């Protein structure tokens, strides 16, 4: 389920419509930008750069949190293995924030934040979207409850 507040959605739709109608807009530039981002990610990774997952950059219709799934797929399409991609959002993120002893791997004494999946993301990275639930700071949220809360938020904002 993908959700964003209606005013935000309306603003984004207006911005995109205005942008694509601008005289300088060239659709092929968008495809070129996507190709460049993939190549840049690939070259940085091959050169040993530590890649950290996080699709909060201002891009069309990228909803922080939900858009992470597109980024996961983009990185696999760039040539990273599903395992390498998962490391960008776990261990590498903890290292980036200077807190590798707090989170990023599942170990005793670490923050209990994790996603329990119904399918193996090492076989197909899109399996990250097939959640059984989420553990946040030791509290369990089953997928049904997450879906219910998202629906309530959507109804409140429509």
Image: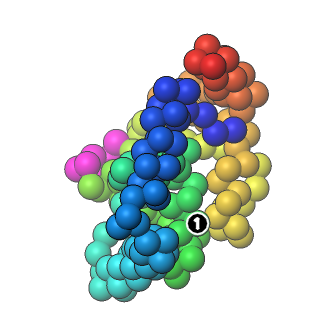
Residue at the top extreme, as displayed: 156
* Residue drawn at 34 percent across, 42 percent down: 102
From the image, give the main secondary structure of the stretch colored magenta.
loop
Residue at the front extreme, as displayed: 23
How far across and down, in percent of the image, does residue 96 sit? 27, 55
How far across and down, in percent of the image, does residue 64 sit? 46, 43
Q: Is residue 27 above or below residue 95?
A: below
How far across and down, in percent of the image, does residue 79 sit? 52, 82
45 left or right, relative to 106: left
Badge 1: residue crowd in 10 Å (few <14, some 14–19, many ≥20) = some
Front-most of residues 96 and 56: 56
* Residue drawn at 69 percent across, 23 percent down: 151
* Residue 106 is at least partly visible in this image: no
* Residue drawn at 42 percent across, 62 percent down: 88
Can you identify the residue that label 1 sits on? Answer: 73
Q: Is residue 6 above or below residue 118?
A: above
20 left or right, relative to 73: left
Q: Does residue 10 show up magenta in the picture?
A: no
Q: Does residue 98 show up magenta in the picture?
A: yes
* Residue 128 is at least partly visible in this image: yes
Work out which quarter of the rendered image holds the N terminus and state it.
top right
How far across and down, in percent of the image, does residue 25 sit? 40, 66
How many dots with numbers? Answer: 1
Work out which quarter of the rendered image holds the C terminus and state it.
top right
Badge 1 element: helix
* Residue drawn at 43 percent across, 79 percent down: 32
Res 131 quadrant in image: top right
Part of the protein shown in magenta: 97-102
């Amino acid at each position: 389920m993908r959700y964003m507040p209606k005013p935000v959605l309306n603003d984004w739709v207006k911005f995109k419509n205005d942008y694509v109608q601008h005289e300088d807009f060239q659709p092929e530039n968008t495809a070129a930008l996507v190709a460049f981002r993939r190549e840049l990610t690939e070259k940085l990774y091959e050169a040993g750069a530590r890649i950290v997952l996080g699709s909060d950059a201002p891009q069309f219709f990228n909803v922080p949190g939900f858009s992470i799934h597109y980024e996961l797929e983009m990185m696999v399409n760039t040539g990273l293995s599903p395992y390498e991609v998962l490391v960008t959002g776990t261990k590498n993120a903890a290292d980036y924030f200077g807190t590798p002893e707090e989170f990023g791997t599942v170990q005793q004494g670490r923050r209990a934040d994790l996603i329990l999946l119904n399918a193996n993301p090492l076989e197909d990275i899109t399996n990250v979207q097939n959640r059984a639930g989420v553990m946040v700071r030791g509290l369990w949220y089953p997928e049904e409850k997450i879906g219910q809360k998202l629906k309530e938020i959507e109804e409140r904002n429509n």
